[in-house]
Amino acid sequence: MRAVLWGGVIVAGLTAAQLAAAPPPTGNVQNDEVAALIESVRAATLRFEDVNVALAEGYLPDPSGQCVTAEVEGMPAELGAMGIHYLRPDLLGLTVTTPRVDGTGTHTDFANPAILLYEPQEDGSLVLVAVENLVFLKAWEAAGNGGPPTLAGRTWNYMVDDPTTPADEAHHFEAHYDQHLWFRDNPNGSLEPFNPTVTCRHHQV
């Protein structure tokens, strides 16, 4: 498996010391590199197409039971959905869950992701559509990082709640950076947070 590293983010197990000088790709090269990255990560996580394997390896369904859509998060519905999140508490370094989820996590290895995203199907099954990593701002900075993580030249999303709005922009988490990587084709972009080809219409609460 070919390993790629951008901006200090481990994609398939190599260290920053091994590939620290690698520049982020641009233009068509970036498209090719992102496609190769997706295939590499998908191969490494293929076993999680069976959600029972994910459960056996320590992933837990989001306790909120939510299937996340852009509309529910106060954004344009046409952006699409994320799906149901399955989390690895140890990789996220979770310490508390109330009043907001917080932790020590600085995990960035997409071949061993902290979060799996599933789309619910009409028959009740789940289809793996993406993976995600999340690092907590305080822990990331405490680890000596001077800026946000990046993947394929893209800066991860910075999420922090704005108490002046009704929506919870950080999804009940403390301030953090997160990054999605889609296996399903995404018209928004393979590294964007929402995918209009993913639906929550079959989600059963």
Image (cartoon, grey):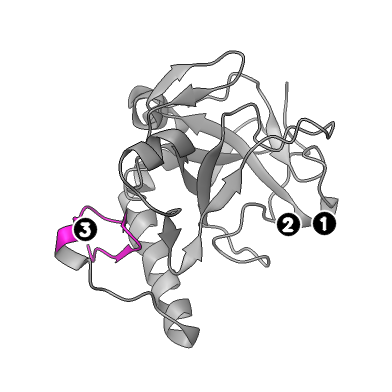
Query: Do callouts 2 and 3 mark residues in contact (Cβ within 8 Å)?
Result: no
Q: Residue at x 28, y 65 (%)?
A: 4
Q: Quadrant of residue 30?
A: bottom left
Question: Dot 2: within a 10 Å radius of its alpha carbon, few (fewer than 14), some, or many (20 or more) residues?
Answer: some
Which label was assigned to residue 113? none
**Lower sequence index among marks 3 and 1:** 3
40 to 143, vertically: above or below: below
Q: Which residues are magenta?
A: 1-17
Residue located beneath label 2 in the image: 196
Secondary structure of residue under mark 1: helix
Quadrant in the rendering for residue 90: top left
Give residue 205's position: percent from left, percent from top.
Answer: 73, 21
User: Where 55 falls versus 37 (above or below)?
Assistant: above
Alpha carbon distance from label 2 to label 1: 6 Å
Q: Nearer the viewer, residue 40 or 123?
A: 40
- Mark number, residue 16: 3
- Would you say the magenta stretch is mainly helix, strand or loop? loop
Q: Position of residue 72 (x, y in %)?
A: 80, 37
